[in-house]
Amino acid sequence: TNSSKKFELETIRLSNQLNDITSDLYDDKEKYHNYFNQSNITIDNLNNQITDLTNQLNALDSIYIYETKQMKDRIYDMTNEITNNKSIITELEIEYNNKVIQIEGLNG
């Protein structure tokens, strides 16, 4: 009958439409799945870069701390050396003054 033929055509049309929608949904699902995978890869790469930069900063910090300690130690050593040199100069001045006194005593 005409009515059943119409119903059959409408069913075929709706079935085709459903297939198209299902296909589009599948394509979208694939597209978004790929997008999220790519996003996760990008996030992982950024996290790795952050980790690398953090490690570099920590290494630089360690070098800075080490070099600062070396400089402090060197300043400490130089300060001791200056103090020792001052003591030696003071001793030499005393010796010099004693000799001057002796010479003046001899010249009397």
Image (cartoon, rainbow, N blue to C red):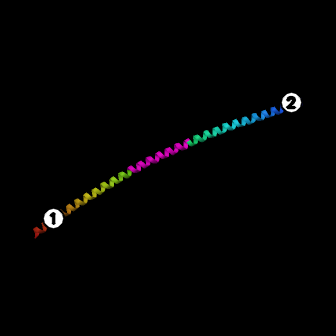
Q: Amino acid at mark 2?
A: Ser
Question: Does 105 appear above or below 55?
Answer: below
Residue on which the image places disc 1: 98
Q: Amino acid at mark 1?
A: Asn
Q: Residue furthest top?
A: 1
The residue mark sitting in front, 2 or 1, is 2
**Left or right of 89 on screen, residue 73:** right
- Viewer-nearest residue: 34 or 85: 34
Is disc 2 in contact with disc 1, using a CB cutoff of under 8 Å?
Answer: no
Magenta stretch?
A: 44-66
Q: Residue at x 81, y 32 (%)?
A: 11
Is 58 included in the stretch rendered in magenta? Answer: yes
Is 80 included in the stretch rendered in magenta? Answer: no
- Viewer-nearest residue: 13 or 65: 13
Mark 2 residue crowding within 10 angstroms, few (<14) / some (14–19) / many (20+): few
SS at mark 2 in the image: helix
Q: Position of residue 12 (x, y in %)?
A: 81, 32
Residue on which the image places disc 2: 4
In terms of image quadrants, where is residue 22?
top right
